[in-house]
Image (cartoon, rainbow, N blue to C red):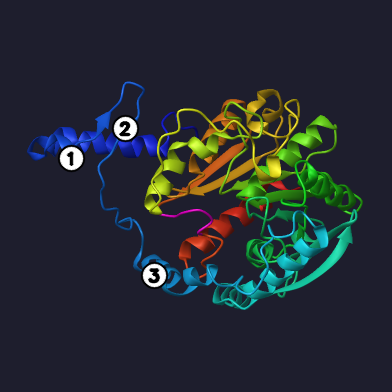
Amino acid sequence: MSYQVGIGQMIVISALLSVSVAGFAQSADDRPRVEPDGTIHVPAFDLPESSYLSAESRAAMRHFREVYGPEFGTFSAGCDSIWAFNGDVEATHAARLCIAEGYYKTAIYKDTRAKHPVKISHTDMGGIYTEVFEPEAGIAPANEDRLLISIHGGGFTIGSRYFSHTEAMQVADMGRIKVISPDYRMAPEFRHPAGIEDVIAVYREALADYEPKKIGILGCSAGAMLTAQVVTRLLLDDLPLPGGIGLFCAGAAMTDGTPGVFKSSRSESAYFAAAQGGRPRPVATEPSATPQGYFEGVDPDDRTVAPGDHDDLLARFPPTLLISGTRDFLLSGVIATHRKLAGLGVDAHLHIWEGHGHATFAFNPRLPESDEVHQTIVDFFDRYLE
């Protein structure tokens, strides 16, 4: 399955067609205006929930707006900012643990744990603190010699020991499979390729107990980007590849002019999502000249930074599952990654959920689509892990 026109482009084209058919009564000021460089000035408009959403989905989204959503702005209250310590590792770690404890008290976390009962423990793998998620119902016989490595999201700055729980426990329970999640190093204390090194250290130790084709690696958002980077490092180091990977809520990073500066920030979906979030952005004529945060100071010759730039490596990727939503600000990168992988002959599968934003499926256990997404993930790895 390959797309020649992005979802965002289709939305704009549809809008223009609507104007051409029914817009004669509109004033010129109300019509989209197209610049010579292709920039479209779209008048403000109302965007309702999609008509494809079920009544159950609408109720779940309303619950998120009224209950779950407000918690995201409060669960870190009383904790120090991770940016307050000038990279002091111990102090920043303590701040992250405080944030995690706040997240455990949220309704999102409690409802997810109640719906997806798992045993959570931790171990040391390759010197890396690694969380372990095992289903209370027991590991299915077919999965006793299989393992999933879940790489948490959080913009390469947050998410350790709390977003990692939300993302891993659902797959562990629904798939009745063991899932582990490395607490990889992030900014502001560390820079690329620290995260890659930590995940690969865990992967190497896992290879002592599991055959590579029985291991899957998956991640959402920054976790998806890191998953693609890890596979690239495995290829460059001639290490065995996992049986399959999942890139959710983001694709393989692609450079936008400067190493460490990515196309995703200036993609169509990024502009659409910014407007939907009440933060319309001016059109940037040039990409940012300097990479920031975790990717500050990256080596221009480091091929792991932006795997999407290197077709020779992408062509050797294992079977890949890509998932996003039509309102995800990183949707464009997911589509672009799928198009590249499919064009290079990789066994790539793309699933997009209507009316859903960034990681919606991960943080709303009441959504029927959340179950659909996680069942799709479970089915993919059941098919491709030997």
User: How far across and how far down the image is residue 212, in percent?
Assistant: 82, 45
Q: Is residue 19 left or right of residue 110?
A: left
Residue type for callout 2: Ile
Residue 183 in which image quadrant: bottom right
How far, Cα to Cα, is label 2 from label 3? 32 Å
Q: Residue furthest left?
A: 25
Residue stretch rendered in magenta on the structure: 355-360
Residue type for callout 1: Asp
In the picture of the structure, the residue carrying the numbered disc 3 is 62
Q: Is residue 178 visible?
A: no
How far, Cα to Cα, is label 3 from label 1? 31 Å
* Mark earlier in primary sequence (2, 1): 1
Q: Is residue 249 left or right of residue 276?
A: right
In the picture of the structure, the residue carrying the numbered disc 2 is 40
* Vertical relation: 160 (above or below) 27: below
Which residue shows up at 63% across the image and 55% down it? Answer: 154
